[in-house]
Amino acid sequence: QVQLVESGGGLVQPGGSLRLSCSASGFFLNEYPVSWYRQVPGKEREFVAFIGSAGAITNYADSVKDRFTISRDNLKNTVALQMNSLKAEDTAVYYCNRHPAASWGQGTQVTVSS
């Protein structure tokens, strides 16, 4: 069964950091490009960051550029999103997905609040 699993979310103060992890079952994540997305209630899911299958190509939404870093460990079959200098507006449920997309996972909640 193809499944994506996001983890690492939590509650953090403004200016803090979190590291999210994306793993998969039913397929090898290291064979695919992967993106992170986020969604807040009442809004559409939005793109956050992209990484190519080899890890050499990355791309970021303007809102997270220079604060977030996407990376992958193809031996561990995971993709990480390091989030630094977090802001209240980063609060959302974060999802990962491959390209082409698989079914969405449950996501992981990130809350930035003092």
Image (cartoon, rainbow, N blue to C red):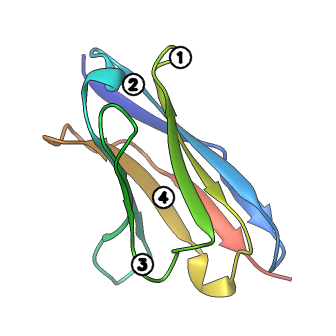
Q: Position of residue 90 (x, y in %)?
A: 58, 77
| Alpha carbons under labels 4 and 3: distance apart | 12 Å
- Give the residue displayed 25% in from the left and 31% down from the top: 32
**Element on which disc 3 rests:** loop
Q: Position of residue 59 (x, y in %)?
A: 36, 62
Q: Nearer the viewer, mark 3 or mark 2?
A: 2
Q: Please say if 38 is above or below 105.
A: below
Near-viewer residue (98 or 75): 75
Q: Which residue is mark 3?
A: 41
Q: Callout 3, which amino acid? A: Pro
Position of residue 48 in the picture relative to residue 34 (left or right): right
Check residue 94 in the rendering and tell me which mark sits there, or answer none: 4
Position of residue 59 in the picture relative to residue 88 (left or right): left
For label 1, count other residues whose C-alpha is less than 10 Å away and answer few (under 14), some (14-19) or many (20+). few
Q: Please say if 113 is above or below 39.
A: below
Q: Nearer the viewer, mark 4 or mark 3?
A: 4
Q: Which residue is mark 1?
A: 76
Check residue 24 in the rendering and tell me which mark sits there, or answer none: 2
